[in-house]
Image (tube, rainbow, N blue to C red):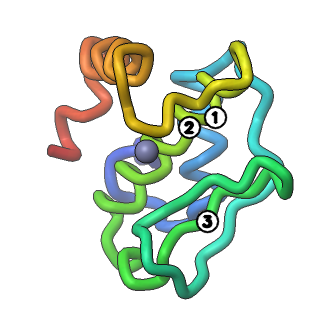
Amino acid sequence: MENITEHGDFEPKVILRNFEERFFPAVPPIAAIRIQKMENAGCYFPLEDCLCISESIAPSWKLVRIIILHELIHHKLRCENGDDDPKEGARFQAELDRLWAEGIYRKLL
Ligand SMILES: [Zn+2]
């Protein structure tokens, strides 16, 4: 079977679940993901426990994956101590370093 994180599967929920299992196994999964009209490329709404992707980037398998990873980092940080590090400071950068070392960005950037 093709590795769905590379390019095969465009279904955002499949991508999300795959990333959660592989890179965030100790973090509670996000309940829902949807594509909608929005100004930002993506956003996580904690009250709804929903990750939203802008329909303008949805056709790009790379951008969708980058945004899902970005929002998963915020989600993980929020689960740790209630602070999702919205300005992508030291805690966020440490997560980026971890994911970079795991190689997930090698085919995305
Ligand atoms: Zn952010």
Instruction: Check residue 44 in the rendering and tell me which mark sits there, or answer none.
Output: none
Q: How many numbered discs sit on the rendered protein?
A: 3
Q: Amino acid at mark 3?
A: Cys
| Camera-nearest residue between 100 and 47 | 47
Q: Within 10 Å of the Cα at label 1, are there few (<14), some (14-19), or many (20+) other Cα atoms? A: many
Q: Is residue 25 visible?
A: yes
| Camera-nearest residue between 3 and 1 | 3
| Residue at the spot of label 1 | 75
Apparent side of residue 48 relative to residue 22 in the rendered image (left or right): right
The spot of residue 37 in percent (x, y) is: 54, 87
Position above or below: 91 against 71: above
| Residue at the spot of label 3 | 52
The spot of residue 96 in percent (x, y) is: 33, 23
Is there CB contact under 8 Å for labels 1 and 2?
A: yes
As helix, strand or loop, the secondary structure at mark 3 comes to strand
Position above or below: 33 against 77: below
Q: Mark 2 or mark 3: which comes first in sequence?
A: 3
The spot of residue 16 in percent (x, y) is: 60, 47
| Residue at the spot of label 2 | 72
The spot of residue 8 in percent (x, y) is: 40, 59
